[in-house]
Image: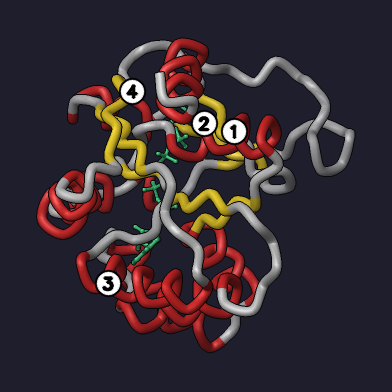
Amino acid sequence: MFLGPPGAGKGTQAERLKADLGLTHLSTGDLLRDEVKRGTPLGLEAKRAMDAGELVPDAVVVGMIRDRLVGDAAANYLLDGFPRTIGQAEALDAMLAEKRAPIEHVLLLSVPREELVRRLGGRWLCRNCGKSYHETFAPYGGEPCEATGGKCDLYQRDDDRSDAVANRLNVYEAQTAPLVDHYGGRGLLRRIDGERGQDEVYGQIASAIQGG
Ligand code: ADP
Ligand code: ADP
């Protein structure tokens, strides 16, 4: 599980980790954006909260994760952006007990707030493969898109360009940061210095997972 504020590098590191370890990547942000794009009832309900940088209600995201986790035979998951509240963490505990699947690692990516603002303000994402780039820190170099083989089709998220950024960072502090104690108390949490370069961050993650 990745914990950490918006812009900490969860999506970036998840891409690498899932490729190296063959994990099923579950990102509630990606799942919600897909619902919005398809104009489903769930997407319509979620959109207002997402545009404002607020959290979507627990029942909605928990239902979405339950549909994918429970009854699915896939062995290993990487949770990215979920859980984000204590209520979601408790619902996850119940689902995993049902599945008889323990949480193995909780990796907290820490990055100072000013750096998060810089990262979110310059983030560009591919519409097709979902990869994150940054106009200064990780510019797109024309490499083939992992989904289409053509060029990546880059766009900026509306909630990265608006007042929603400050709100998302405040919401993280108020509602998600308490999960640090929730998992820390169980001895599952490892802190990763997310301010380093992408390769160095990945190295810290790899060694945390290997118990180093
Ligand atoms: P970031 O990676 O920038 O933190 P995400 O893509 O994870 O953003 O999430 C985008 C938005 O989707 C959030 O601001 C929130 O509105 C909604 N969202 C994503 N995951 C959750 C969740 N677990 N609980 C509630 N809302 C969520
Ligand atoms: P999250 O999923 O946690 O919201 P992302 O992985 O989308 O974060 O990263 C946010 C932005 O920061 C993206 O533009 C990404 O290219 C950039 N980024 C990610 N990791 C680093 C890093 N270690 N150093 C500098 N920029 C980074």
Residue 75's spot in the image, x, y percent?
65, 57
The reply to whether the C-beta atoms of the residues labelled 3 and 4 are less than 8 Å apart is: no
Q: Is residue 73 above or below residue 132?
A: below
- Say which residue label 4 marks: 194
**Dot placed on the residue nearer the N-terminal end, 3 or 4:** 3
Between the C-alphas of marks 3 and 2, the distance is 25 Å
Confirm whether residue 5 shows in the render.
Answer: no
The reply to whether the C-beta atoms of the residues labelled 1 and 4 are less than 8 Å apart is: no
Between the C-alphas of marks 1 and 3, the distance is 25 Å
Which of 153 and 79 lies nearest the eye of the viewer? Answer: 79
**Dot placed on the residue nearer the N-terminal end, 1 or 4:** 1
Q: Amino acid at mark 4?
A: Gly
Residue 106's spot in the image, x, y percent?
35, 43
The reply to whether the C-beta atoms of the residues labelled 1 and 2 are less than 8 Å apart is: yes
Between the C-alphas of marks 3 and 4, the distance is 26 Å
Q: Nearer the viewer, mark 3 or mark 2?
A: 3
Q: Which residue is pictured at 17% across the width and 55% down the height?
A: 182
Between the C-alphas of marks 1 and 4, the distance is 15 Å
Left or right: 173 as drawn, with respect to 41: left
Residue 210's spot in the image, x, y percent?
49, 25
| Residue at mark 1: C-beta within 8 A of ligand 2 | no
**Dot placed on the residue nearer the N-terminal end, 1 or 3:** 1
Q: Quadrant of ligand 2?
A: top left
Q: Which residue is pictured at 56% across the width and 64% down the height?
A: 31
* Residue at far bottom of view: 41
